[in-house]
Image (cartoon, grey):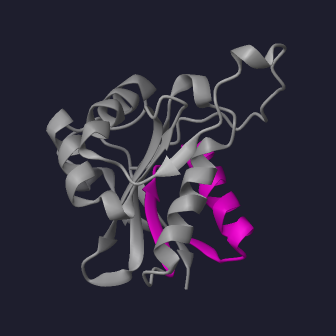
Amino acid sequence: MTPVTQSSTPPTAPADTADAPAEPHFRAPRISDGIRMWQIARDSKVLDVNSSYAYVLWCRDFAATSVVATAGDDEAVGFVSGYRRPDAPDTLFVWQVAVDQDQRGRGVAGRMLDSLWDRLTDAGVTRLETTVSPDNEASIAMFTALARRRGLRITRSELFTPSDFPDSHMAEDLYTIGE
């Protein structure tokens, strides 16, 4: 599930630039970022929160296919977790996208996706997949905007129904960007 925890409202100019958040930088996650990724996911109140161990392990095993946004002190303020599908190595599956509260509304999520896509294009990635629940308009808009910026086609198909989950999980539609 890829809920977006970023407002679609355009950013407004801060009254005092000293209070404005630092412009984020983008890099591959390190093991030490796993703690912040877990906290950001937990604090989002919309993501399915995995165990803290999963985020730390993700930073070790899937750093090459993930990205973190960092603030001035190099602390993670957002992340995109993804992996290359074993049966389709030209496809990046985006698992989660999250942005810390004080960075929302600044286009950080979209810029993280662009940064990750740019990095992986040289490694042979030509397609992105993600799942989104039908009621998550912010995620749908974010991935549609990514496709539009890249001049790529985006398609939606049904993937998982609520009966595919052992709990009260909503349906997850598959969005594919690219060929």
Residue 149 in the magenta stretch? The answer is yes
The residue drawn where x is 65% and y is 77% is: 153
Residue 8 falls left or right of residue 125: right
Q: Quadrant of residue 124?
A: bottom left
Residue 106 to residue 133: above or below = above
Is 172 placed left or right of 70 in the picture?
A: left
Residue 158 against residue 67 in the figure, above or below:
below
Q: Quadrant of residue 94?
A: bottom left
Q: Is residue 169 visible?
A: yes
Which residue range is magenta in the image?
126-155
Q: Nearer the viewer, residue 31 or 133?
A: 31
Report if residue 81 lies within the magenta region.
no
Q: In the image, residue 17 lies at what x, y percent?
A: 78, 19
Residue 81 position within the rendered picture, expressed as x and y whole percent measured from the top left: 37, 53
Q: Residue at x 41, y 70 (%)?
A: 92
Viewed as shown, does residue 14 lie left or right of 52? right
Residue that lies at the very extreme toward the front in this rendered image: 73
| Residue in the image at 69% along x and 72% along y | 150
Residue 13 spot, x, y in % from top left = 84, 25
Which residue sits at x=56%, y=69%? 118
Q: Where residue 63 appears, x then y in whole percent?
A: 31, 57
Residue 156 visible in the picture:
no
Quarter of image, res 148: bottom right
Going by the image, does 167 lie left or right of 82? left
